[in-house]
Image (spheres, rainbow, N blue to C red):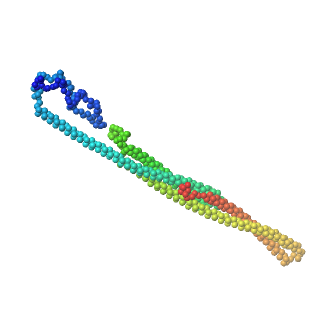
Amino acid sequence: MEFLGTAQLASYCGTKKSCLFPDLAPTSTTKDTYQSYYLPGYRYLSSWRPSLLHKVVSVPPGSNEQFNPTGRPPTVLPALRSALHARYSTRDWHQENTVQLKGSEASRCCAGRLNADSMRLIQDKDQLTYQMQEDSRRNLGERISSIDFWRSELTYELECLLKETQALETAKNRLKCAADEMQGPLKVALECLYHREKRTGIDLVHDDVEKNLMKEVDVFKDCQEILTKIAQKISQQLGIIRDVQHALEQDLSDKNSAHFIDEKCFNLRNTSDSINFYHGVEKADGSVSVPATWAKFSEYNIRCSQHARANSVKLREDAEVGLESTSEEMWNHFISTNLAFNNRIAEVADAKNKLQAQLAKILQEIFQTEDTILLLERSIKAKEYPLKVAQTRLEGRTRRPNIELCRDAPQFQLVTEVYTIDNTLQTLKQRLQEAHDTLQMLILNKSKLEHEISVKANSFFIDKKCMDMRKVFPSTPRLIGYT
C-alpha cells in the first residue's frame, strides 16, 4: 500500500538512468581526439562542442542517492513537496518548451545560414584562388612569350652580328694580304731604281722611266698606307663589335635563364612536389626594372648591334672600294712604267744601233785614211827621186864653162821643175799631216763611239734586267686580298 501523493515505483527499481544519453566521463575527449587545424596567417579556431550536452552528461549519475539511499520510494511526504509542485505551471512548461524550440530553431537557422554562407564563401574563395592562379599562369605565359620574342630577336641579331664579324674579319685579312702583296712590286720598283743608278755617262739621265718608277714607289707606299689605315679602323670596329656581341650574349643568357625559371614556375601545379611555404617572400621585392625598361634594354642592345653592323658594312664597302681603287691604280702605274721601259729600251737600242753603224763607218773611214796615208807617204817617197834628178841636173849645169852658163829653156824648165816638185812635196806632206790628224780624230771618235756603245749596252742590259724583274706582278684578285 502506497501513500497518497507518492510516486509508485517497483521494488526492483533503483536509480533511474537516462535512456537518451549514456553516462559520460566528466572530461571530454573531443579535444584529444580531434586536433584543431589552422592555415598560415589565419586565427586559431577552437573546435566546436555542444556545451549543453556536456552539461547534461556530466551530471553524476548517483547525485539523487542521498535522498533515497535504499532505492525505495519514501513512505512519508517529503518536505516542502507542496512547494515543489507549485514552482512551475503547465503553461510555463509549454512556454519554456516553445522558447527552447524557437531558440533551437533560431540556432539551427543561424547555423544553416552560416553553413550556406560558409559554403558560398568557400566556393567564392576557391573560385577566386583558381582565377588568381590562372591569371598568374596566364601572365607567366605572356611573360614567357615576351621573353621568347626578345630571345628570337636577340638570337637573330647575334647571328647577323656574327656573320658581319666574320665578313669584317675577312675584309681585314684581305686588306692585310693586299698590303703584303704590294710589298713585292714595291721592292721590285726600288731595286729597279737602284739598278738604274748603275748607268754611266750621259745615260744617267732623269728620264720617263725613272719618273714613273719614283711615282710608282710613291703610289705603292700610299696604297699600303691607305689599306693599313682601313685595316686599323676595322680592328677598332671589331673591338666595338666584340663589346656589343658580349652585351647581346649576356642579355640572351639572362633571357634564357629567365625563360627557364618562368617556364618552371608556369609548369608548377598544386600537386607538384617542389612547392613549399616561403613566409614573407611576397614582402621582398628584388626587381631592378619594369617592363618598359626591360624591353628598352634589349631594344637598346639590338639598336647598338644594328648601328655597329651598319658601321661595319660601311667599313667593308670602304675596304672594297680601297682595294679596287688601289689595285687599279697600281696596275695603271705598272703598265705606264712598263711602257716607259719599253720606249726607253727601244730608244737605247736604236741609239746603240746607230752608234754601231756609225762606228762601222768610222772604222771603214779609218781604214781608208790609213790607206791614204800610205799612198801619200809612197807618193812623197816617189817625188824625192825626180827632185833629186832635177836638182842634180841643175847642179851639173852649173859647172858649164864661161859663156855656156846660159839661162836657156832647159835651165828655166829645170828650175820650174824643182820648184814644182818641191811645192808638190810640201803639199803632199801637208796633206799627209792632215791625213794623220784625221786618222787621230777618227780613232778618237771610234773610242768615243765604242764607249757610248758600251754605255748604251749597259743601259740596255739594266733596263732589260729591270723588265725581267717586272715580268711577275700580282694579279688583280691577289691585289684585292684574295689568295
Q: Is 371 drawn above or below residue 223 in the view shown?
A: below
Q: Residue 326: percent from the left, percent from the top? A: 53, 58
284 left or right of 94 in image: right
Q: Residue at x 15, y 25 (%)?
A: 9
Q: Nearer the viewer, residue 174 or 104?
A: 104
Q: Is residue 303 above or below residue 459?
A: above
**x and y percentages locating residue 38 in the rendered image:** 29, 36
Compared to residue 446, the image places residue 100 above or below, namely above
Residue lying furthest top in this view?
70
- Residue at x 67%, y 61% (from the top left corner): 457
At which x and y percent is residue 252? 42, 47
Residue 391 seen in the current view: no
Identify which residue is drawn at 65% across, 65% down.
350
The answer to whether residue 378 is left or right of residue 317 is right
Which one is in front, 356 or 144?
A: 144
Q: Quadrant of residue 192?
A: bottom right
Q: Name the residue furthest front.
A: 1
| Outermost residue, right side | 401
**Residue 443 position in % (x across, y down):** 73, 64
Residue situated in front as seen by the camera: 470 or 269: 269
The quarter in which the C terminus is drawn is bottom right
